[in-house]
Image (cartoon, rainbow, N blue to C red):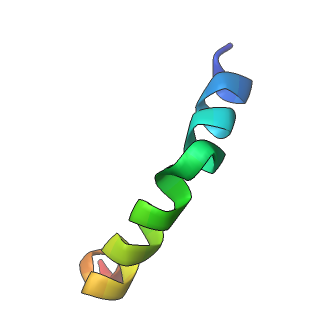
Amino acid sequence: MASAAVLAYLTEGRLEAFKVFRVSGYGSR
């Protein structure tokens, strides 16, 4: 599976974007 690839991609720099999204209030759902 492409789990490792996705994880690497997320940790590549998407983590910051995800954090911003969560702070925005989108992850409140």
Q: Is residue 11 left or right of residue 29?
A: right
The residue shown at (37%, 75%) is: 20
The residue shown at (66%, 38%) is: 7
Question: At which x and y percent is residue 14?
Answer: 48, 51
Q: How many marks?
A: 0
The single residue placed furthest to the right in the displayed view is: 4
The residue shown at (64%, 17%) is: 2
Question: At which x and y percent is residue 11?
Answer: 65, 48
Q: Is residue 22 left or right of residue 14?
A: left
Q: Taking 14 as reference, is 4 above or below it?
A: above
The single residue placed furthest to the front in the displayed view is: 13
Looking at the rendered image, the quarter that the C terminus falls into is bottom left
The residue shown at (40%, 62%) is: 17
Q: Taking 24 as reference, is 7 above or below it?
A: above
Q: Taking 18 as reference, is 29 above or below it?
A: below
The picture quadrant where one finds residue 5 is top right
Question: At which x and y percent is residue 27?
Answer: 35, 76
Q: Nearer the viewer, residue 11 or 4?
A: 11
Q: Taking 10 as reference, is 1 above or below it?
A: above
Looking at the rendered image, the quarter that the N terminus falls into is top right
Q: Is residue 4 left or right of residue 25?
A: right
